[in-house]
């Protein structure tokens, strides 16, 4: 997990997964990523990182790292241990449009914020994940009785220490929502 360091412009290594490619190459928490395959990271925004690191299993990237404990600059080779394109997509946020049961219409009309909060807690429980991974957006409904009531839910990746390590796609794939929540939900991905 990398974060842009504002003073130097390089990427600070917040966390290294034990046994992962970066760990195997010798990268440690606190290091500064300076260069990937000849690209100076001071000129790269965080959104541009996937284009530099994503690739097929077995291929490698060359990195230049400033060791956080020794202040020594080192060149390392990271060999991708799995298809990082798949891993990257599983760590992106995902927006879901959830159709709520008609029985939710009165609450959606009188208190949409209360309904959104209740839905958020139910989604957290149903997916057996942390609350920081689920955001509930607007609750909308058609103008007439019988028209659907929708809620926008965003599932986020969890990179926090001790957090839920499952990717966003893995959470959605489980899809236990319609069985566990008091609101009859229909997931529309």
Image (tube, rainbow, N blue to C red):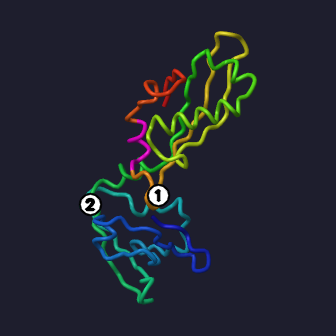
SS state under label 2: loop
Q: Is residue 36 above or below residue 8?
A: above
Q: Where, by quadrant of the figure, is residue 33 drawn?
A: bottom left
Residue at 57% across, 74% down: 5
Which residues are the magenta region?
A: 166-172
Residue 96 image offset from top left, x and y in percent: 53, 34
Which secondary structure dominates the residues rendered in magenta? helix
Alpha carbon of mark 2 to alpha carbon of mark 1: how far?
19 Å
Label at residue 180: none
Q: Is residue 30 above or below residue 21?
A: below
SS state under label 1: loop
Residue at 51% across, 35% down: 123
Residue 178 image offset from top left, x and y in percent: 46, 24
The residue carrying mark 2 is: 81
**111 on left or right of 95:** right
- Considering depth in this image, is 189 or 49 the residue closer to the camera? 189
Residue 34 visible in image? no
The residue carrying mark 1 is: 159
Residue 144 image offset from top left, x and y in percent: 71, 11
Magenta-span inclusion, residue 171: yes
> Tag 1 or tag 2, which sits nearer the N-term?
2
Residue 12 visible in image? yes
Q: Is residue 32 above or below residue 70?
A: above
> Crowding at label 2, few (<14), some or many (≥20) Cα neighbours within 10 Å?
some
> Crowding at label 1, few (<14), some or many (≥20) Cα neighbours within 10 Å?
some
Between tags 2 and 1, which lies in front?
1
Residue 10 image offset from top left, x and y in percent: 52, 75
């Amino acid at each position: 997990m990398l974060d842009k360091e504002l003073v130097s412009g390089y990427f600070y290594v917040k966390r290294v997964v034990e046994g992962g490619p970066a760990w195997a190459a010798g990268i440690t928490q606190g290091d500064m990523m300076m260069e990937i395959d000849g690209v100076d990271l001071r000129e790269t925004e965080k959104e541009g990182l996937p284009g530099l690191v994503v690739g097929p299993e077995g291929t490698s990237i060359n990195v230049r790292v400033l060791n956080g404990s020794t202040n020594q600059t080192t060149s390392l080779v990271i060999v991708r241990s799995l298809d990082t394109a798949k891993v990257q997509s599983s760590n992106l946020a995902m927006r879901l449009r959830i159709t709520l049961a008609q029985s939710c219409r009165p609450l959606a009309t009188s208190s949409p914020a209360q309904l959104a909060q209740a839905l958020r807690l139910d989604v957290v429980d149903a997916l057996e994940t942390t609350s920081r991974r689920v955001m509930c957006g607007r609750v909308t409904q058609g103008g007439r009785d019988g028209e659907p009531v929708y809620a926008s839910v965003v599932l986020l990746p969890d990179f926090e220490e001790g957090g839920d390590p499952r990717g966003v796609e893995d959470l959605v794939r489980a899809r236990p929502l319609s069985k566990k929540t008091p609101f009859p939900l229909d997931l529309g991905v």
